[in-house]
Image (spheres, helix red, strand yellow):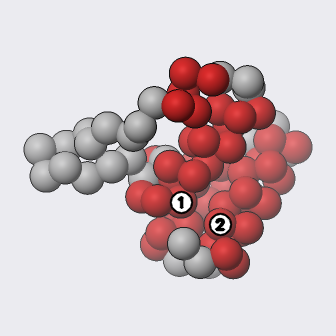
Amino acid sequence: LPAESAFTVGLLSAAADLLRRSPADVAPQLPLSAEVAEALTAGAGPLGELLSLVHAYEASDLPALITPPQPTTATGHFP
């Protein structure tokens, strides 16, 4: 994962929380790469998975941290 993209996803997720808005509402208003936008709007791709793990860590959700991600489509893509 590109460190810059991971940082951007985390920063925008936290900024959206501070603004009491959904990251999915904020992302379309910004010039973001497709990977960053998908992570913020749909929790998709490796960046979305990383963001989900961070949220689980912040919530002390141990089962979510130790459960491997499962494919969500017939093609075997991960969220």
Residue designated by label 1: 47
Residue type at numbered disc 2: Ala
Residue designated by label 2: 6
Q: Do the CB atoms of the residues marked 1 and 2 lie less than 8 Å apart?
A: yes
Above/below status of 51 relative to 7: above
Residue 16 appears left or right of 30: right
Image position, residue 65 (x, y; %): 58, 33
**Could you say which is closer to the camera, residue 76 or residue 19?**
76
Secondary-structure class at tag 1: helix
Image position, residue 10 (x, y; %): 73, 57
For the N terminus, the image quarter is bottom right
Q: Earlier in the sequence, mark 1 or mark 2?
A: 2
Image position, residue 54 (x, y; %): 68, 43
Residue 39 appears left or right of 73: right
Residue type at numbered disc 1: Leu
Tell me which residue sits at (65%, 66%) in the image.
Answer: 6
Outermost residue, front side = 66
